[in-house]
Image: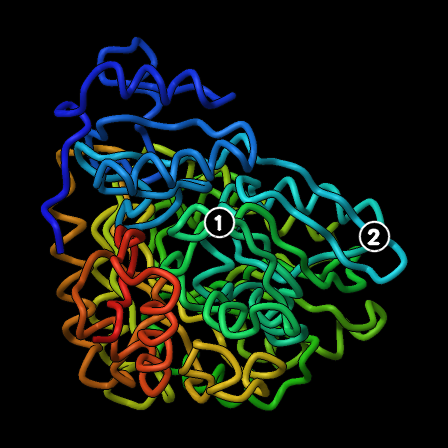
Amino acid sequence: MKTKQKVKELDNSLVEAFKNQIRGELILPQDTTYDESRKIYNAMIDKHPGMLVMCADVADVMYAVNFGRENNLLIAVRGGGHNGGGLGLCDEGMVIDLSGLKFVQVDTNDSSVRVGGGNLWGEVDHATHAFGLAVPAGIISSTGVGGLTLGGGVGYLSRMYGLTIDNLLEADMVLADGSFVTVNEKQNSDLFWAIRGGGGNFGIVTSFKFQAHPVKNIIGGPSLWPIERIEEVMEWYHDFLNNAPDELNGFIATMVIPGPPFPEELHNKMFCGIVWSYLGDPAKQTEVFKPVMDMEPVFHHVGEMPYPSIQTMFDGMLPPGLQWYWRADYFDALGPEVRAKHLEFGSKIPTPLSQMHLYPISGAAARIGKEETPWAHRDAKYAGVIVGVDPDPANADKITDWCKDYWEALHPYSTGGAYLNFIMDEGQERIKASYKHNYDRLSRIKKQYDPENLFRVNQNIEPKN
């Protein structure tokens, strides 16, 4: 692999010629907008690219890829900028920013939706909701469509309609050689398989086509129990949810209630929580949630709301610009040892926004074969994530240490891999463990489409030798 060149080492005439070639804006370190433009969701990441290419269209993406490859620049691709490890940025190289590639087109004939590579999920939800439709996605509306989709896409609708990748019908891509291709089950099917969980390793997706589903309103919201009851609640939850109909979803969490809109008596206390989402008959709500009420939560605020409302429920609590540290694993059981660790570390959450989530991988998400997509852990019951979060950089070590300690205590009970949208930059062995038996096939496809590993600022799959 060649040593990457730095943008500042390029001849000014080259940079100027490239600037004149594109329709979008080229931002350089000396520009007044540079510092604002290099910010991403996780403020713990502080990288200084040599240039940011704010693409206005697909042609800009193609020109940028060619310029980066021909000048041996390190390339990072930024969609929504939510990536925990900051893999939408790089130091001294080129950032190809897709935020100018935005459109959402709903086709009512087949309930499909085409989405630009720079869209955020809130923009998709807004457009599809008007037609009584939704695409399965995550739990925060400011997440980028591209990053979440290419990594898998776990969220409120997963048990009913599968992961986001299970609903991807087609994608348009710019490859490492600068060419443009459309991928689906019939065209470039190997590449289509690879991007459904293989991340940004194979090219830059400039548009997606998804299958949407009939979702207008959802019955959802949180139930809370004191953290002291977490072992009991987790044992019950595992049996209850895994025997529940696909229409019911709920992710379990350890959390602190930071303040409004929750009642004052709950503020700054530690809880075990479950955030529910139910897509079934509203008339059956009381019946469906009776087992929950039998567990006597101290707070239960579940009701009917538009689907975009549950998708934005946490947006206000978790705005861009906070300090984040992430760790993750898959789990297939919540045995006594696991429950005890959650009690231990859930009882010493360091800051009000730090938390742990376990997202169920069951129902429709578990009925996809483990080789049908690169997402290999279909037999795991949960995708777990621990995040240390705080607005104050002075607390970075505190939240990082708690997150690492929590993860290290739980990791021996995990399946060995992690949902790659939930981890930082943790090295090749973690990536291989997460793709398991699918890694070799991904590596061969990488060799075919990106033999020089141009797209390497990601959870990187190395080209097979």
User: Which residue lies at the image location 39% right of the left edge and 50% below the top edge?
Assistant: 177
Q: Is residue 450 positioned above or below 293 on the image?
A: above
User: Which residue lies at the image location 39% right of the left edge and 63% below the top edge?
Assistant: 449
In which quadrant is the C terminus drawn? bottom left
* Residue that label 1 marks: 179
- Of badges 1 and 2, nearer the viewer stands 1
* Residue that label 2 marks: 107
User: Which residue lies at the image location 34% right of the left edge and 14% below the top edge?
Assistant: 33
Assign a secondary structure to mark 1. Answer: loop
- Return the x and y of residue 308 as percentages of the image width and height: 67, 47
**393 and 224: which is toward the camera:** 393
- Return the x and y of residue 461 as percentages of the image width and height: 28, 67
Q: Is residue 456 positioned above or below 13 on the image?
A: below
Q: In this view, does 178 lie to the left or right of 170?
A: left
- Return the x and y of residue 44 as percentages of the image width and height: 21, 39
Quadrant of the image occupied by residue 285: bottom right
* Mark 1 and mark 2: Cα distance apart in space: 27 Å
Say what amino acid the circle numbered 2 marks.
Answer: Asp
Count of numbered circles on the image: 2
Q: In this view, does 181 lie to the left or right of 79?
A: right
Quadrant of the image occupied by residue 111: bottom right
Say what amino acid the circle numbered 1 marks.
Answer: Ser
- Mark 1 / mark 2, whichever is N-terminal: 2
Assign a secondary structure to mark 2. Answer: strand
- Return the x and y of residue 139 as percentages of the image width and height: 53, 55
Q: Is residue 442 left or right of residue 414?
A: right
Q: Give the label on residue 292, or none.
A: none
The colour style of the image is rainbow
**412 and 260: which is toward the camera:** 412
Q: Residues within 10 Å of mark 1 (few under 14, many from 20)?
A: few
